[in-house]
Image (spheres, rainbow, N blue to C red):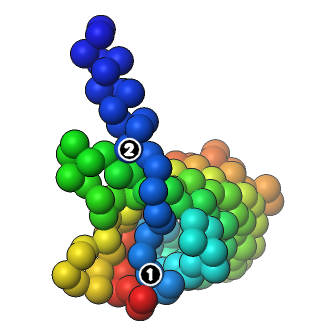
Amino acid sequence: MKKILVLFALLLTGLIGKSQDYDLGIGLRGGVMASGLSAKYFFQPEKAIEGVLTSKIGDTRYDGFMLTGLLEIQKPFHARTLSLTSLSWYYGVGAHAGSFSTVGVNHSFVTAGVNALFGLEYLFIDLPISISADLMPIWSFNSDFYLDNKLDLSLSIRYVIK
């Protein structure tokens, strides 16, 4: 138990420092539920907005698009004992809205709701690339889709502009 507490304390002391070292990242997000184009813009050192445009949502029965906007807080994860200076963690909240139709059936619907986000991002030192993995709980208000409230797991890769 003492070893776990010591490890936890070391990790917590590593959570101070500077945020991600780029202004804009553009790339792809591949998720269980939502995959598409992703753009992340830092408007302050530790605050970013992210937009995800999805053309199809995790189920081949539906066709359409959805736009998700997120406000994120990003903190460095500088566990110097582990040499992870390019790793950061982030969390955020946002909203989504979209329009879909059921494939092969004359049935259309819209979806809107809120999202949360928790993740890790790694910025390569020698390459203008970042990779992130996150969990995004999704709650929808008014549609046939997402009413059972989903949890999306995704991996994103972005080209970064400093």
Q: Quadrant of the N terminus?
A: top left
The alpha-carbon separation of the residues under discs 2 and 1 comes to 20 Å
Asked if residue 127 lies left or right of residue 16, the reply is left
Q: Element at badge 2?
A: loop
Residue at 31% in and 21% down = 6
Residue 77 in the image: x percent, y percent? Answer: 39, 51
Q: How many marks?
A: 2
Instruction: Report the residue that reaches farthest toward the right.
Output: 142
Closest to the observer, 12 or 158: 12
Instruction: Report the residue that reaches farthest toward the top.
Output: 1
Asked if residue 142 lies left or right of residue 118, the reply is right
Residue at 66% in and 67% down = 71
As displayed, is residue 106 above or below residue 141?
below
As displayed, is residue 51 above or below residue 7?
below
Residue 4 in the image: x percent, y percent? Answer: 30, 18
Q: Nearer the viewer, mark 2 or mark 1?
A: 2
Q: Residues within 10 Å of mark 1 (few under 14, many from 20)?
A: some
Which label was assigned to residue 22?
1
Looking at the rendered structure, the kind of residue marked 2 is: Gly
Could you say which quadrant of the image residue 58 lies in? bottom left
Closest to the observer, 150 or 47: 47
Residue at 72% in and 58% down = 114
As displayed, is residue 5 above or below residue 133?
above
Residue 67 in the image: x percent, y percent? Answer: 64, 78
Residue 40 in the image: x percent, y percent? Answer: 52, 79
Asked if residue 62 lies left or right of residue 76, the reply is right
Which label was assigned to residue 63?
none
The answer to whether one can see residue 127 in this image is yes
Looking at the rendered structure, the kind of residue marked 1 is: Tyr
Instruction: Report the residue marked by disc 2.
Output: 14
